[in-house]
Amino acid sequence: MERREVVFGMLTLGTAGMPRRLSAQSAPRTYRIGVLSLFLPPGRFVTFFKSVGDLGYVEGRNLVIEYAFADGQAGRLPGLAADLVAKKVDLIIAPYNLEVEAAMHATSTIPIVMQYVGIPVESGYIASLAHPGGNVTGMANAPPEVAGKAVEVLRDALPHIADVAVLYDSAYPDQNPYWPELVRAFKVLGIRPTYLPVTGRVGLDAGLDTIAAKRLDALYVVSYRTTFVHQARVIEFAARRRLPAIYTGRAAILEGGLMSYAPDYDVVRQRAATFVDRIFKGANAADLPVEQPTKYSLFINLKTAKALGLKLPQSFLMRADEVIE
């Protein structure tokens, strides 16, 4: 009896410890994502993190999000990137080129997922789209030729335009790869561009005053930083001056802009979320091919066209992926 009691006691002690060990083993891991952003506020990441959540990573349950925003001040990015590394995040989201560069200087081991980065190979971030080779992967932005295609779209909508204002933020280099194609398209189509670099609200207002004074035919808006943050101001100006405008993002059309030619950025964000999932499941960033948008969509706001007194060609309207009426 004594021997049986001893054996029973040992079994009891052993099984008493098991639930605690099993509980510890089955407890879900909490992941930490760092978001490094030059100017995009938290609200601009809602769609992205919804897609991350659909893949099983939910803030407050098994996900912690560390936001690091530079408020448009590029000089703050290196310090913010270093702070994210010090917080031991598992992965860094870097939407644009400047954020990627700052993150790369801060770490060569923590995976960095791009969202809208132009020419990442030529910029030196990755070895190739198929084989990135380092700690950077994710989504590349539209290739430079899309900028020229947008000019063609503008001409197809408005065959008689001759003078076009190009409104863009001059403070950041992310747009530089697109300029040669833009210049080429204007030259081939015989359109005279007026380039208006603007930075901040004061610079934007000065640029809009120049457009009003020159009495130009149309407006090509590069949606980045100043023109993005103050998009409503640009749309209101175009409506008031009865000036047709093309934008580089669908969001402007939903707010009353005339038209845009761009990737579907909701799809881009959804695809970027899959990189987070694969990395958290053990994939190496170096082995995950970088993706580019494969579909570019034409969005038209017909209400705005009517308000501007425009009769867009029926053949042009039939090409649209979405028409807002």
Image: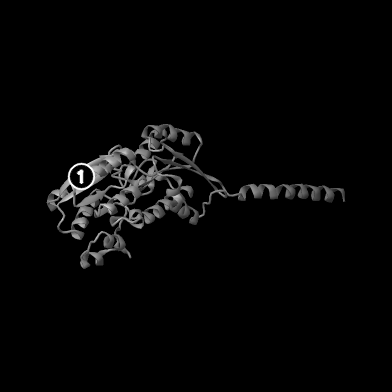
Q: Front-most of 291 and 66?
A: 66
Q: In which quarter of the image is residue 152?
A: bottom left
Q: In this view, does 85 lie above or below 57?
A: above
Q: Residue 185: in sight, yes or no?
A: no
* Residue 294 relative to residue 157: left or right: right
Which residue type carries mark 1?
Ala
Q: In which quarter of the image is residue 108?
A: top left
Residue matched to label 1? 213
- Which corner quadrant holds the C terminus? bottom left
Q: Residues within 10 Å of mark 1 (few under 14, many from 20)?
A: few
Q: Front-most of 3 and 48?
A: 48
**Residue 100, x across and y down, in percent:** 37, 39
* Residue 81 relative to residue 20: left or right: left
**Residue 97, x across and y down, in percent:** 33, 41
The secondary structure type at the circle numbered 1 is helix
Q: Front-most of 256 and 31?
A: 256
Residue at image point 47% right, 34% down: 83
Q: Residue 245: in sight, yes or no?
A: yes
Residue at image point 49% right, 33% down: 86
